[in-house]
Every structure is written in structure tokens, then in C-alpha cells.
Amino acid sequence: MPVPGYPRLKSVASKRAESFGNGIPHEGMYTREELKELVAYCAERGIEVIPEIDMPGHNQALAAAYPEFFCFPDHNTKVSTTGGVGLYLVCPQKPEVWKFYAAVFDVLKDIFPSKIVHLGGDEAPLEKTWQKCPLSVKYRQKKGMKDVHEELKEFEGKMASMLAARGRRPQLWYEKPWAEAGIYRKGDTVFTWRMGLTPSTITETKKQGLPLIIAAGEHCYLDYPQIPGQDNRGWMPTTTLERSYKLDPAYGRPEKATDHIIGVQATMWAEHLPTLNHLLYRTYPRAMAIAEAGWSPMDVRSWDNFRRKVADHRAFVLKRFNYDLERTKENEPPFK
Ligand code: ACM
């Protein structure tokens, strides 16, 4: 997304040398007009687009463009060519970081009518960054902060205030250690996503008064392969259609223990989607399974009945998108 005053988002951050070792350079950035068109297209179909600006982590592309925003500026930083957790966390003690996000939020306000902005907040190795950052160390000492979590709490609070000034509120990926450190404020909507942690997260978020969206990794991550043997980047589990369908958003618990669960999310990460064909293949039919899990009580759910419905939808999707099954076979596996 272009942000006035930050041309290196386009000239540097929007380009990478290759994707997962395929040797093919890749680049792309929306214009403001394209984003507005997308938002309008979705609105006509009853869909609200909620943008995510992940912070403080998942920011290697920003570090390549503006290394001075980070604790340990490295002018040789390159846009990542793979996925995963990085060590690039914006530094809360640099005024230019706050100026940047103010500009980002102004653009968001102009493009996205949604009152919600997802601020990410996942996979941020504070101990390897802010913990050692000279500016942060000094700041924490001055303020009498006992650890980096207190600094993060202040960071998230300041971001939430900046959003509030623009009539927006944040949503965040749930991270247990952060919840334990009191970083989420009552009423913040959070997402459960880590494999195996959803049952405990349902309990914890209920206690803390946090509305919860179920994006459980073991059912809802649509970038995972769906057939054994497909490219899994070395670690991804296979998430079959049946596994996605087996999602019970309440995890078998009674309503009074789950009345803070406000929805489900099917998560399609896009570090590398070589073609539209590939995106559709990954997304369908599992998105249908998650949609039914979100809309239908467990006592009317039936795998056999769902499979019959999928056959109809499959015919529709193949036709509507001129879907090319042969090309999908070429791309899977591997999709380099
Ligand atoms: C996530 O998958 N890092 C939220």
C-alpha cells in the first residue's frame, strides 16, 4: 500500500529477489485507487474489508526500505524470500516510527471504511530485539518498567489511541505470554491461531473479557497442503477438507463458556501463490467447510451431507473461475 512520504515502500519493500528458492523475482503493490475499487467491489457483495498492518514484528520488508525504524539498523537488509518469524521489530523509541504509523493510519482511514484495523502482534521476538536495544533499555530504566512486556503494553496502547483518534479500533493475534502480561485491554478482539492452543485460549479469553475469533491452525489455515505428499515447505501439516470441516468453533463447550466467541476465520497466507489457480485450489473447498462451521450448529452438521453440497459448489467454482485442473497438477507439488 503506498503511503505519501515513504517512496521506498514501492521501490524497495514491494519487491523481492525470488520466492522460496525459485529464482524468479517478484513484485507488486496496490495503488490507492485499486484498493478503493476492491473495497467497493466487496461492499456491493456484503463484504467488509478489514486491513491488517502487522506490528511490531513481521516487518522485514519495511526494514529493507527503512532500516532506521529498527533497533539495530542494517542497511544490507533484504526483503525476505521465504516465510516465517523474523527479527525485524520496529523500535518504539524512535519518533520516526510513530510518524510513519500516523501516516499509515491516515491512508487506511481514507481507503477502508471498516472501523477495525488488525494490528497483528504475532510472532515478535522481543527478547532478541527490544530487550537489547540501547534506546529501549534506557527508556525502560527511566520509566521504571520491569520488562519488555511493559514496553509492549505501552506500544499497543499508543497504537490503539492513534487508531481511536481516527475512529478505529484494533484487533490482534492472541499470544499467551502477552495476555499473561496484561497487554490486551478488556474488549479487544483477539484471534486464536496457534496449533493446539485453542481450547486453553477459549478459557483464558473468557476470563479476560476478550471477544474471540476462531482461526485454529489445525482447521483454518488454508495455506497448508490438503493432500498428503503435497509441498509443505518442510513443516506444514496436511489439512484435509474433512479436518477443516471437523472444526467445532465452541470445542464442545456450553454456550455460557463460549459466548465471547464472535466468529470464525479461514486464514489464507499469501507469501507465495504462483497463480490465481493456485489460490483457488488452496482456498476451495476448505473455505466452504469453515463457513459451514461458522454458520451451523453442531447438531445439524453432517460430513456426508456437506460432501454432497461441495460437489455442486465445485462445479460452480470450476466454471466461474475457468479453473484449470491440469495446471494445478503442474503446480502441486512442488509449486516452484
Ligand atoms: C500467524 O499465523 N502468524 C498469525
Image: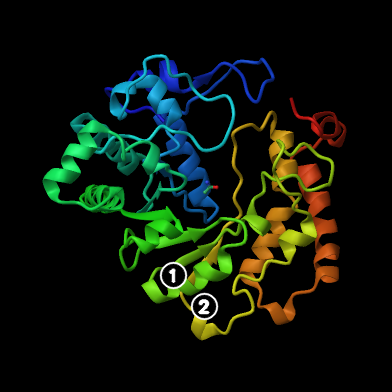
Q: Give the residue type at disc 1.
A: Thr
Which quarter of the rendering shows the C terminus?
top right
Return the residue found at the far left. Answer: 142
Per the image, label 2 sits on a secondary structure element best described as helix
Q: Residue at x 50, y 81 (%)?
A: 257
Q: Is residue 177 left or right of residue 95?
A: right
In the image, residue 256 above or below residue 302: below
The quarter in which the N terminus is drawn is: top left
Task: Return the residue nearer the eye: 160 or 320.
Answer: 160
Can see residue 55?
no
Q: Position of residue 209 (x, y in %)?
A: 37, 73
- In this image, 179 relative to 317: left or right? left
Mark 1 lies on a secondary structure that is helix
Q: Nearer the viewer, residue 223 or 204?
A: 204
Please tell me whether residue 334 is drawn above or below residue 64 in the rendered image. Answer: below
Numbered label attached to residue 205: 1
Q: Position of residue 221 (x, y in %)?
A: 64, 51
- Circle 2: residue type: Thr
Residue at left offset 29%, top offset 47%? 148
- Tell me the tag on residue 258: 2
